[in-house]
Amino acid sequence: MNNQYGLSGSLENYLRIIYELESKQRVSRVKDISEKLHVKNPSVCGTLRILKDKGMVNYTPHRVITLTEQGRQAGRALYGKYSMLYEFLKTLPGVDREAAARAACGMEHTLSPSIRRGLEALTEILREDSRLNEQLHGRVRD
């Protein structure tokens, strides 16, 4: 637990997924979280109890799950890190979307603010400079 929220990587994943679900459909359900994380419903329920105890979610069994304000702030920040990493990794030669998603999910928990800023800048350069992007992709093919 080396992050500003005092949460394990697994708990952070739950918060990010709940944030994503809330952003798309306003609420989330145990079943939705279970499907996204490929875990069983009892695991989701146990984790939701922990997140509730930490003040991150509003959870009552058999009801919809919503984020508290603290949970929403943490979820938004985690989603931002994940999204930035995913976008960066997709620009790399030979990295498909699924591999980028898996890697981003693992990396988001240890990303410092300075590394994030650097990766954001590099991602933008690679997007804007097609010549540089082609050179990078050409080097990997060679």
Image: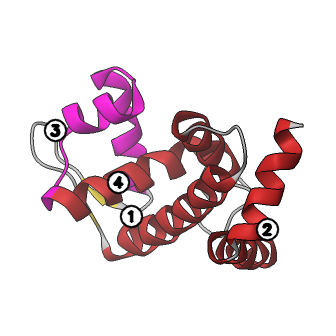
The image quarter in which residue 6 lies: bottom right
Q: Is residue 118 left or right of residue 126?
A: right
Q: Position of residue 131 (x, y in %)?
A: 75, 69
Q: Is residue 90 left or right of residue 42?
A: right
Q: Is residue 108 visible?
A: no
Q: Residue at x 58, y 37 (%)?
A: 96
Q: Which mark is residue 132?
A: 2
Q: Residue at x 30, y 69 (%)?
A: 68
Q: Position of residue 76 (x, y in %)?
A: 43, 70
Q: Between label 2 and label 4, give the one nearer the viewer.
A: 2
The image quarter in which residue 19 lies: bottom left
Disc tally is 4
Query: Which residue in the protein does label 1 denote?
Result: 55
Q: In this rendering, is residue 98 above or below 134?
A: above
Do the CB atoms of the residues marked 1 and 4 lie less than 8 Å apart?
Answer: yes
Q: Which residues are magenta?
A: 25-53
Query: Which residue in the protein does label 4 denote?
Result: 52
